[in-house]
Image: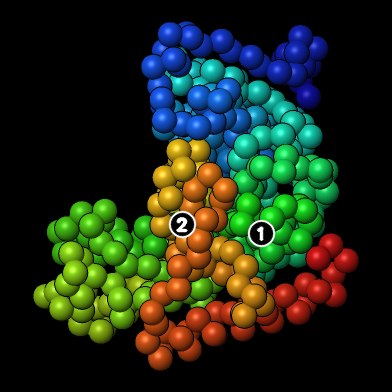
Amino acid sequence: MNKFMLALASMSLIVFVEHAVSRKASCHESCRYINSGHARIAVIGVGAVGATTAFCIMMRNITSELILVDVSQERTMGQVYDLSDAIPACSTSRVTVGTFKDASLADIIIITAGAGRKPGQSRLELININQKIIADIINQMVPINPKAVIIMISNPVDIMTLCAQKLANLPLNQVFGSGTYLDTQRLRGLISEKLGISQHSIDAYILGEHGDSQFAVWSSAQIAGTPLKDFCGMCPEELDRLAYAAKQKGLDIITLKTATCYGIASCVADLCESILFNQKRVFPISCFHEELGVCLSMPAVIGENGIEQVLSVPLDEKEKAKLENSAKQLRDVLAECLSSPVM
Ligand code: NAD
């Protein structure tokens, strides 16, 4: 730590910034957490994804308190100071440097800690490094607020979600991963560009692994009741091209700028909003499927209890085979992980 950081640390590890009470009072009358006190969101890991997620959550005006935790005290303090400059522009009144114990008391715990994917590296290659980090984090947090919802972002997200589920000692519906929500948003964006229709009106999903074996569910993809396949230019080859482009987009961004952060941050903010406002919106998120023996993405209703319901999607025979392939890929990885002491 340099002198500046030491001076800050000696004054206080916690940055507490009061915000005009009058501004807060007018916000979010319908938010259960804010009405009953205030919502606290912890972000563990404040690198590119964690910091952008924290900023995105602040700008959405969905929480009064943000707790940032990272193994790097300097980085955490730097992010807290930087984010505190944005407080006048939003309804968040506290942004603090926290401990794992502080994070364990939050209403929502977002985990973004871990190594990022290097160019050319698959998400599954990250597993050995990141599963140790996730196990370490969860072990330092337990016992966790029994009402907390944990949202896993660290990759490979399906494996890390399972790891967190095993160690957190919370009901499974309260621990899920961002899964293929980002991939789905990317696909909808590409379809939107192609058809000139807002992506908010496009009902199409990418399901399965957040990774190489993910697949687009074209058999039920539609806009206003019209199957996507019936739109001009949406031949099977074009649909394949769009699904491939959506899958590759993450790697393309990483190749250009070494990390992705804005898309995932806005996805996480959507999930937090649906939890805190009990919106019960449907998201493709990673959760445990007993019949498949793994965590992977299916559409689920997200509300104040985390996963309120997992929806069963009609799949054609090809899609069923792709789902089973995705589960098999993940089971194969898990078989390797089981020999590791942290799982
Ligand atoms: P980053 O390197 O910028 O940040 C990671 C942070 O984790 C660092 O600040 C590091 O100090 C911290 N960290 C490491 N070990 C820790 C520990 N034990 N406790 C607390 N903090 C710890 O990486 P990033 O670009 O922010 O990516 C973070 C993760 O998010 C990666 O695994 C990446 O693959 C993943 N990611 C997932 C998605 C998705 O769709 N699920 C999208 C983008 C990135």
Q: Is residue 54 left or right of residue 228?
A: right
Query: Do the residues under discs 2 and 1 have CB atoms within 8 angstroms?
Result: no
- Say above or below: 255 vs 207: above
Residue 104's x, y, as percent? 73, 38
Residue 308's disc is none
**What residue do we see at 40% from left, 91% from top?**
317
Query: Taking 102 as reference, is 258 left or right?
Result: left
- Which residue is depicted at the point 59% across and 64% down? 287
Mark 2 or 1, nearer chain start: 1
Instruction: Tell me the quadrant of the picture where the N terminus can be found.
Output: top right
The residue that label 2 is drawn on is: 301
Q: Nearer the viewer, residue 196 or 257?
A: 196
Q: Where on the picture, by quarter, is residue 315?
A: bottom left
How busy is the neighbourhood of tag 1: few (under 14 within 10 Å), some, or many (20 plus)? some
Neighbourhood count class around disc 2 (C-alpha, 10 Å): few under 14, some 14–19, many 20 upward: many
Look at 57% across and 48% down and name the residue there: 305
* Label 2 CB less than 8 angstroms from ligand 1: no
Apparent side of residue 298 relative to residue 152 in the rendered image (left or right): left
Helix, strand or loop at mark 1: helix
Q: Indicate the amino acid at tag 1.
A: Leu
- Name the residue beneath numbered marker 1: 172
The picture places residue 87, in percent across and down from the top left corner, at 49, 18
Return the residue nearer the eye: 99 or 237.
99
